[in-house]
Amino acid sequence: MRDAVIVDAVRTPIGKRNGSLAGIHAADLSALVLDALVRRTGVDPATIDDVMWGCVTQIGDQSSNIGRFAVLAAGWPDHVPGVTINRACGSSQQAVDSAAHAVMAGQCDLVVAGGVETMTRVPLGSHRTTGQPYGPKVLTRYEGAELNQGIGAELIAEHWGLSRQQLDAYAAASHAKAAAAIDDGVFDDHVVSVDVDGDKFTVDEGLRRGTSVETLSGLRTPFKQDGVIHAGNSSQISDGAAALLVTTPERARELGLTPIARYHSGAVSGADPVTMLTGPIPATAKVLGRAGLSIDDVGAFEVNEAFAPVPLAWLAETGADPERLNPLGGAIAVGHPLGASGAILMTRLLARMRSRNLRYGLQTMCEGGGTANATVIELLS
């Protein structure tokens, strides 16, 4: 089987809800990163075999196979296809996995993987306006449970004995780490500036410098009276897009490109859809077993910060070094544009691995419905 390698990765800055990216259609926002990717690599778009594009809420602006219309918005040739993938919050991580699988299997040589979500324009929960999500048999199977992520986060915090103080301390640290990464220019190489009303939008705008346990203490807990989950220790509703170019080492060499990392191993796993957000724990065990690695072999972990209990429960179960977990901050600090987040986390993981010369990195995402992706990459350059 052939190797699959990542040769470049780009993303927009993450826009907060009703923020700098609110006026940009999802197809046009996607086109920005597609254009940037081919401009940076010099790859002719006509030679790209497929564009695999994550998006979660596929209605309104994001309907009608947004992956295909992203390609057309970028002005790429009509013959370049695009497909939209939905594995809930892990949609663009699944896009990267699927791109790697297609390359490794020899069915494609050059694939763009990534995703988009404009949560300002297509609000969270829009899918509930018509029909019956989940279906009566599922709801009966789980005894009418709400299948609500916020409630799932409360259940996780209770199960692992995580206090509000611990969760808020984690959230404050996420902001501090993200601020340090921005100030150190860690993201500068892969963040694409966006023209907004004549100004250049370049920095994730959800960051709240100076966030502390004290500043978070007054926020109400909407999911449970006297609960521990609130807006400050949850991921932010956001807009954004990201894209990666996946190919073989041989094709990269033909194109004069230097691979950054090799796709080493991937796995997907399911978990209880009521607690919903524990999937990264079995997915991590599964991918490490497939990779033949131990938790200590991995130099950096990106565990999506959907809610603070998710990475903290993952940490407790895996025994990973906490210093290696989300070292550049995460979605609590800068936002979680659902369909783009998997690809955004991959850009962040690559940046950390390159700056510290770390051989292995692992990324995992909790996902609605109780699934989770986990991916291991190996640094090459």
Image (cartoon, rainbow, N blue to C red):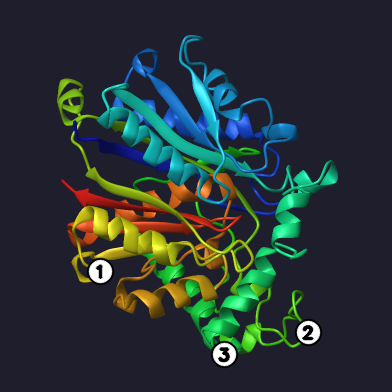
Pointer 2 with pointer 3, Cβ within 8 A: no
Asked whether, in this view, residue 293 is left or right of residue 329, the answer is: left
Q: Label 1 belongs to which residue?
A: 295
Mark 3 against mark 1, which lies toward the viewer? 1
Pointer 2 with pointer 1, Cβ within 8 A: no
Q: Closer to the N terminus: mark 3 or mark 1? A: 3
Q: Position of residue 75 (x, y in %)?
A: 52, 16
**Element at label 2:** loop
Q: Label 2 belongs to which residue?
A: 225
Q: Quadrant of the N terminus?
A: top left
Q: Nearer the viewer, residue 346 or 185?
A: 346
Q: CA distance from mark 2 to mark 1?
A: 37 Å
Q: Closer to the N terminus: mark 2 or mark 3? A: 3
**Element at label 1:** helix
Look at the picture and state if 47 lies above or below 125: above
Q: Position of residue 13 (x, y in %)?
A: 51, 49
For image coordinates 51% across by 71% down, the residue present is 310
Q: Position of residue 232 (x, y in %)?
A: 63, 74
Residue 243 seen in render = no
Q: CA distance from mark 3 to mark 1?
A: 27 Å
For image coordinates 37% across by 33% down, the residue present is 99
Q: Residues within 10 Å of mark 1 (few under 14, many from 20)?
A: some
Look at the picture and state if 153 lies above or below 32: below
Look at the picture and state if 372 lies above or below 80: below
